[in-house]
């Protein structure tokens, strides 16, 4: 009996425990509301960029208990913080609103091609509630898959317990009032309330966040975040610096986020720029591109090059640091300049290759880039501007595969305060490449083509892959697109402004190849030896960079006025070209006009030759000759001062007293006697009594000389002691110079004597 009673008690305990657990197992317990953060494939961004578009950050969410029908969807605050400044464009001149967008459930995309876009604050989704602009309320219809369906002016009718329009009748708010509509795009704002200068943060306040439950899923996409890549810099090792994002959500809904910290971009050098061809062989007396109708009369030219014996045109090379470093402003530029495209809407004809450049340089108005998740490879981000057309198909071929079909309303702010959301994602210009030339010698100018084409660095002999156009800009390389020429061309040259700033804007680029562009820098000048022009001995330098470029601290912060994209200045200037004094330099190692001896000197201007027909390529030149005396003067005095063929001061031997091409200067040291051809030589007798050596500089490139020492007043037939020798050319040419025996940098005709 006792054992039986024990069994009764044991069975009672089991029954009690079973009674406690049955309701729990029978109850449908919803899984927790949680999201998994993902950055997809982070793009490579330019280390020189202050406003680089990072990859979209997405949250894929499941679970939780959906908001019941007729109830207000709980609101949350969402914040994204980077390890550098967020420089997304401010869309208002006052207030914190920027272009960063939160898009929920992928409307108007391959996932939901028929779902319209409706932003909070647009017509039909008022943001006039107590929380202010860019904050909307959504009333649930009880179906979490419809919470963000983009319907305008709809609400759940609490009287009929059904979804309906906002009419102000019983059970619904008035049309256009707060709580109407189901928006799916929300606008971010810069910084935090605690620290307005905390520019590494973007927040979305009061976002209605409806848990999807178990019947659907929820996607949150954060796009149009731009970052200051300069702050992080390009790694000097084999590692790569990266931009990292952290996401935080807090509010009325309990939400767990897996992997809240994501890499959204890698930072690499975006531009390799260097002088490709230098030219230090220009001669002051050999004019370049200065003929009738040339740059000195019109400021322009066609198919210009620098000419002369072995003179190559100076040039500067830009090379992409990585594929897609150079971008057009908007997808319309790619569509409009593609082989086989029809102007304006992006439809490609049969057999067209989407990324093949057609050779045109159209600069059309923007098309909308309004498909979430599409990769456009342009400087603009997600943009949906009122009165701006969509591509057709949308997205364009090569950007997406599933065309969207929804008729949607462009991003707009219709409330009492305009948050400027319609300007979200719109870039100020395409990638710009700047070339700063400094130290242009006085009396010379440089000219560059109005367009330069790109080639694939892996196939430089192949067809051009893209193009850039010379544009007018401010001193930073900024400003609306304004081509220098109405019909830009690689063969049309224009004179560079006195500032020396040259800026090109990319109109078409291939995002799938590493491209380069060589900019020829044509030098032009007229020979003006009387004024010692062009200025010799000055070296012009060139430095390349992205543009627009800024050095101010404000450029590292978000701005409503500074252009997007923008960059830091470029490289240290490198030597590009110089103009040499047109001279032939001679040494007469022993000259005597004393103790019964005298010296006669003959200098021939040999720049005149039989011509190209016979295989000669000298250029006829003329110029004066200057003499310097080194030794002792009359009776041991100091040597005589320098003199020119016009007895003028040093360095002023004008063309009026020049030795013409093909003529010979003769000079008797003791008397200054002699001639230039049949005319006077302009020299005096200051060399009487001198003994030593003489250096002579002729203002022409090719000269040869002979000196004869004999008895004073005696001729070559004199029975006295006499000696003749060739003058030694001191210039940089021929066999003597590579071994280091050249005295000057002049390009002369240094024959072996």
Image (cartoon, rainbow, N blue to C red):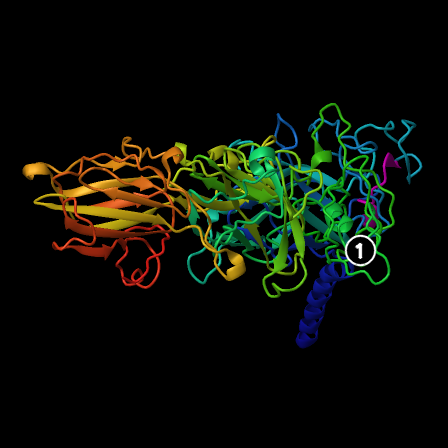
Q: Please determine whether, in this image, residue 193 is positioned above or below residue 39.
A: above
**Residue appearing at x 67%, y 52% in the figure:** 377
Q: Is residue 181 left or right of residue 510?
A: right
Task: Farthest residue to the top: give it.
Answer: 416
Residue 107 image position (x, y, % from top left) = 79, 48
Which of the two residues, 181 or 107, is positioned nearer the viewer here? 107
Question: Crowding at label 1, few (<14), some or many (≥20) Cα neighbours within 10 Å?
Answer: some
- Note whether residue 593 is visible: yes
Give the camera-side residue of 180 and 592. 592
Per the rendered image, the range of residues in magenta is 144-157
The image position of residue 392, as x and y in percent, is 84, 49
Q: Quadrant of residue 430?
A: top right
**Left or right side of 118 for 80:** left
Q: Position of residue 232 (x, y in %)?
A: 47, 48
Q: Which residue is mark 1?
A: 110
Residue 156 falls within the magenta-colored stretch: yes
């Amino acid at each position: 009996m006792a054992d039986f009673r024990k069994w009764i008690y044991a069975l009672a305990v089991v029954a009690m425990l079973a009674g406690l657990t049955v309701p729990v197992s029978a109850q449908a317990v919803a899984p927790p509301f949680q999201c998994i953060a993902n950055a997809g494939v982070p793009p490579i961004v330019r280390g020189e960029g202050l406003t680089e578009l990072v990859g979209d950050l997405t949250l894929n969410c499941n679970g939780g208990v959906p908001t019941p029908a007729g109830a207000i969807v709980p609101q949350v605050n969402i914040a994204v913080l980077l390890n550098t400044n967020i420089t997304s464009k401010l869309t208002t001149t006052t207030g914190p609103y920027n272009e960063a967008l939160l898009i929920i459930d992928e409307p108007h995309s391959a996932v939901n091609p028929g779902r319209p876009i409706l932003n909070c604050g647009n017509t039909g989704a008022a943001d006039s509630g107590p929380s202010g602009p860019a904050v909307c309320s959504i009333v649930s219809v009880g179906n979490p898959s419809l919470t963000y369906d983009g319907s305008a002016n709809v609400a759940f009718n609490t009287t009929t317990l059904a979804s309906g329009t906002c009419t102000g009748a019983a059970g619904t708010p008035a049309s256009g009032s707060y709580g109407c509509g189901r928006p799916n795009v929300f606008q971010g704002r810069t910084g935090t309330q605690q620290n307005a200068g905390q520019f590494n943060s973007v927040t979305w306040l009061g976002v209605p966040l409806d848990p999807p439950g178990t019947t659907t899923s929820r996607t949150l996409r954060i796009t149009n975040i731009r970052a200051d890549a300069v702050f992080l810099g390009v790694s000097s090792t084999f590692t790569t610096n990266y931009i990292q994002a952290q996401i935080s959500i807090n509010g009325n809904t309990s939400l767990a986020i897996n992997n809240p910290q994501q890499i959204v971009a890698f930072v690499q050098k975006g531009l390799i720029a260097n002088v490709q061809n230098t030219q230090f062989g220009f001669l002051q007396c050999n004019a370049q591109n200065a003929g009738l109708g040339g740059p000195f009369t019109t400021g322009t030219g066609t198919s210009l090059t620098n000419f002369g014996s072995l003179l190559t045109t100076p040039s500067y090379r830009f090379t992409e640091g990585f594929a897609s470093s150079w971008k057009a402003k908007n997808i319309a530029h790619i569509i409009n300049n593609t082989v086989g495209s029809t102007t304006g809407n992006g439809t490609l004809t049969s057999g067209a290759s989407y990324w093949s450049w057609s050779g045109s340089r159209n600069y059309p108005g923007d098309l909308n880039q309004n498909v979430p998740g599409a990769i456009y490879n342009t400087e603009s981000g997600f943009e949906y501007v009122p009165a701006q057309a969509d591509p057709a198909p949308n997205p364009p071929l090569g950007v997406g595969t599933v065309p969207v079909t929804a008729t949607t309303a462009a991003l707009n702010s219709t409330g009492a305060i305009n948050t400027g959301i319609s300007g979200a994602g719109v870039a100020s210009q395409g990638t710009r490449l700047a070339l700063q030339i400094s130290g242009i010698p006085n009396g010379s100018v440089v000219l560059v083509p109005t367009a330069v084409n790109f080639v694939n660095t892996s196939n430089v002999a192949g067809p051009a892959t893209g193009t850039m156009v010379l544009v007018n800009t401010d001193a930073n390389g900024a400003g609306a697109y304004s081509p220098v020429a109405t019909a830009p061309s690689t063969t049309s040259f224009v004179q560079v402004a006195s500032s020396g700033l040259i800026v090109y804007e990319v109109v078409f680029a291939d995002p799938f190849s590493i491209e380069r562009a060589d900019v020829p820098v044509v030098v032009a000048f007229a020979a003006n030896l009387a004024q010692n022009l062009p200025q010799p001995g000055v070296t012009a330098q060139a430095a390349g960079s992205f543009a627009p470029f800024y050095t101010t601290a404000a450029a590292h912060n978000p701005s409503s006025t500074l252009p997007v994209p923008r960059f830091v200045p470029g490289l240290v200037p490198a030597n590009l070209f110089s103009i040499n004094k047109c001279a032939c330099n001679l040494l007469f190692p022993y000259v005597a006009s004393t103790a019964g001896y005298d010296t006669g000197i003959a200098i021939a201007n040999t720049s005149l030759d039989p011509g190209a027909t016979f295989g000669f390529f000298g250029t006829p030149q003329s110029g004066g000759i200057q003499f310097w005396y080194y030794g002792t003067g009359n009776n041991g005095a100091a040597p005589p001062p320098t003199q020119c063929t016009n007895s003028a001061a040093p360095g002023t031997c004008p063309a009026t007293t020049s030795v013409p091409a093909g003529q010979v200067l003769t000079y008797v040291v003791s008397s200054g006697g002699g001639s230039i051809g049949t005319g006077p030589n302009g020299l005096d007798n200051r060399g009487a009594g001198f003994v030593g050596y003489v250096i002579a500089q002729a203002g022409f490139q090719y000269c040869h000389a002979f000196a004869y020492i004999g008895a004073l007043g005696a001729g070559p037939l004199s029975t006295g002691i006499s000696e003749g020798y060739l003058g030694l050319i001191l210039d940089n040419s021929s066999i003597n110079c590579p071994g280091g025996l050249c005295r000057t940098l002049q390009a002369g005709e240094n024959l072996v004597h």
